[in-house]
Amino acid sequence: MKTVTVKRKAHFNAAHRLYRADWDDAKNLEVFGKCSYPNYHGHNYELIVAVTGEIDPKTGFVIDLKVLKDLIKSEVEEPFDHKNLNLDVAEFSQLNPTAENICVVIYDRLKAKLDAKFAIEVTLYETPRNSVTYSGN
């Protein structure tokens, strides 16, 4: 069997604030800079989800890209798009919504819904020049 990786791009806009509640404003500013400002800030996030698996000899697919599209929509775009991640997404009520943590949360949400036979990798672009990738390790 041939193993292939298929990828799907997605996009969402969201606000967040990087800070630790147990630190004062000066310490948060020192560590997180402008990203710690109390009134939040936003990003136009770009997402690439890669799914690796064997080609199904019946369909010719690794995974039906419509299935992957719908999963990304329900697990990422709908809960994250135009939201304040700190306030509106349960996983970030106690977790600092850094790009790294957002990427891991997205991975966990998607991995939980996909067949275990698939390996996945999530790449999140917070800006066109800053990205993080997580593959479960």
Image (cartoon, rainbow, N blue to C red):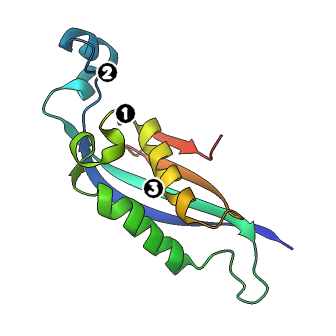
SS of the residue under disc 3? strand
Q: How far apart are marks 1 and 3 (CA)?
A: 20 Å
Residue 32: numbered disc: 2
| Residue 72 place in picture, x, y as percent | 44, 65
Q: Residue flagged by tag 1: what amino acid is it?
A: Leu
| Residue 79 place in picture, x, y as percent | 31, 58
Residue 58 found in image quarter: bottom right
| Residue 17 place in picture, x, y as percent | 25, 33
User: Which of the image's four quarters has the C terminus?
Assistant: top right
Tags 1 and 3 touching, CB below 8 Å: no
| Left or right of residue 134, residue 15 in this image | left
The structure residue drawn at horizontal position 52% and vertical position 77%, both measured from the top left corner, is 67
Where is mark 3, residue-wise? 47
| Left or right of residue 91, residue 25 in this image | left
Mark 1 nearby-residue class (10 Å; few <14, some 14–19, many ≥20): some
Q: Residue flagged by tag 3: what amino acid is it?
A: Leu
Query: Furthest residue to the bottom?
Result: 58
The structure residue drawn at horizontal position 34% and vertical position 62%, both measured from the top left corner, is 77
Tags 1 and 2 touching, CB below 8 Å: no
- Above or below residue 67? Residue 137 is above
Q: Residue flagged by tag 2: what amino acid is it?
A: Phe
Disc 1 or 3, which lies upstream in sequence? 3
SS of the residue under disc 1? loop
Residue 50 found in image quarter: bottom right
Residue 133: numbered disc: none
Disc 3 or 2, which lies upstream in sequence? 2
Mark 3 nearby-residue class (10 Å; few <14, some 14–19, many ≥20): many
Where is mark 1, residue-wise? 95
Tags 3 and 2 touching, CB below 8 Å: no
| Residue 53 place in picture, x, y as percent | 73, 67
Query: Furthest residue to the right?
Result: 1
The mark tally for this picture is 3
